[in-house]
Image (cartoon, helix red, strand yellow):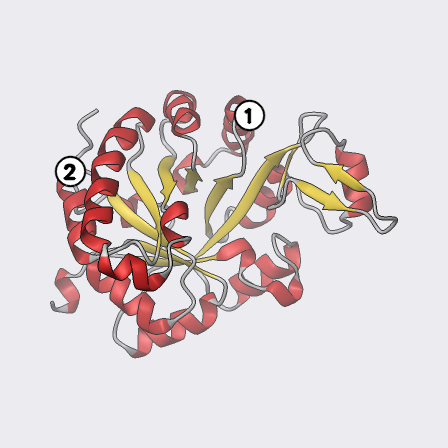
């Protein structure tokens, strides 16, 4: 396949892509942008007093052995426990104009709050929302229709030992394809975000024919990233995005930087038949 015929794709920094600087931290996001990473992923949760914060885990451990359950804790208490904690508003205000953003929802029931924050910020076309909850994505299709939505899937498959998965790969993926077709229509999602082990050229092509594009997580091996790009994946999320960018560019697979997700996702697949 020559360069001109390849679909566009990009690289996303998983939680900022810098564990050393802190996941979901301002320092990590700044480092990724400074290194030229085109897109940033962050985890979004709702606090007990209605704030949207960037945290992956549902529980924050405390030095005294106690813990804060995020959905019950106040923003003030969480900031004491996590001094570099960012709210979604702070993240979008500082980084949303400098990179595309992927908001990964770690719960459900706060779609209206999320839509309000993104609308106040003013650039939903720069937002790609992923979630395991089809109902959440369906609500967001109504509340925030100009943002892209991706159903996150494949978590159970990753717990299957590779040896077993290799022997039963085709029937497992065939069943998954059927389940995805049903759930994606229910979710009104334009994309599916799959764990990299799940993706094959057959599955990616089948989904594209049905009207859905594929992104993939969490990809740290340049060989896997190259395989996924050749399979037609439109974005790869990585803990080491800078190294992945360098490796892909050296292999003549050039990730793109864009003002909107539409430049990357808006080509190459028919509209989903909801």
In this figure, which residue is indicated by the disc labeled 1?
110
The label on residue 210 is 2
Is residue 241 something one can see in this rendering? yes
Residue at 38 percent across and 49 percent down: it is 259
Q: Residue furthest right?
A: 64
Badge 1 marks a residue whose secondary structure is: loop
Marks 1 and 2, the one that precedes in the sequence: 1
- Residue 193 screen position, x and y as percent: 35, 46
- Residue 92 screen position, x and y as percent: 56, 42
Q: Where, quadrant-wise, is the N terminus in this rendering?
A: bottom left
Determine the CA span between mark 1 and mark 2.
29 Å
In the image, 86 versus 217, the foreground residue is 217
How many circles with numbers are drawn on the protein?
Answer: 2
Q: Is residue 66 left or right of residue 49?
A: right
| Quarter of the image where one finds residue 199 | bottom left
- Residue 112 screen position, x and y as percent: 52, 22
Q: Where, quadrant-wise, is the C terminus in this rendering?
A: top left
The label on residue 250 is none
Residue at 18 percent across and 52 percent down: it is 170
Above or below for 205 versus 69: below
Badge 2 marks a residue whose secondary structure is: helix
Residue at 64 percent across and 54 percent down: it is 25
């Amino acid at each position: 396949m020559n360069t001109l015929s390849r679909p566009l794709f990009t690289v996303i920094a998983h939680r900022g892509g810098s564990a050393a600087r802190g996941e979901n931290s301002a320092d990590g996001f700044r480092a990724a942008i400074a290194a030229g990473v085109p897109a940033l992923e962050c985890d979004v949760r709702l606090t007990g007093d209605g704030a949207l914060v960037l945290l992956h885990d549902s529980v924050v451990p405390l030095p005294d052995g106690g813990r804060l359950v995020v959905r019950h804790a106040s923003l003030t208490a969480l900031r004491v426990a996590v001094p570099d904690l960012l709210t979604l508003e702070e993240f979008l205000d500082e980084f949303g104009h400098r990179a595309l953003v992927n908001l990964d929802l770690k719960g459900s029931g706060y779609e209206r709050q999320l839509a309000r924050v993104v609308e106040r910020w003013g650039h939903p076309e720069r937002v790609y929302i992923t979630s395991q909850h089809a109902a959440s994505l369906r609500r967001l299709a109504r509340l925030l229709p100009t943002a892209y939505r991706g159903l996150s899937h494949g978590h159970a498959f990753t717990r299957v030992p590779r040896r077993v998965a290799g022997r039963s790969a085709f029937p497992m993926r065939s069943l998954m394809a059927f389940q995805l077709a049903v759930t994606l229509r229910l979710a009104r999602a334009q994309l599916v975000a799959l764990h990299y082990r799940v993706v094959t050229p057959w599955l990616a092509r089948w989904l594209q024919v049905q009207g859905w594009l594929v992104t993939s997580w969490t990809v740290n091996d340049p060989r896997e990233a190259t395989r996924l790009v050749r399979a037609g994946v439109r974005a790869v999320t990585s803990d080491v995005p800078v190294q992945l960018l360098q490796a892909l560019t050296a292999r003549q697979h050039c990730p793109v930087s864009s003002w909107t997700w539409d430049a990357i996702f808006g080509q190459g697949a028919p509209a989903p038949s909801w």
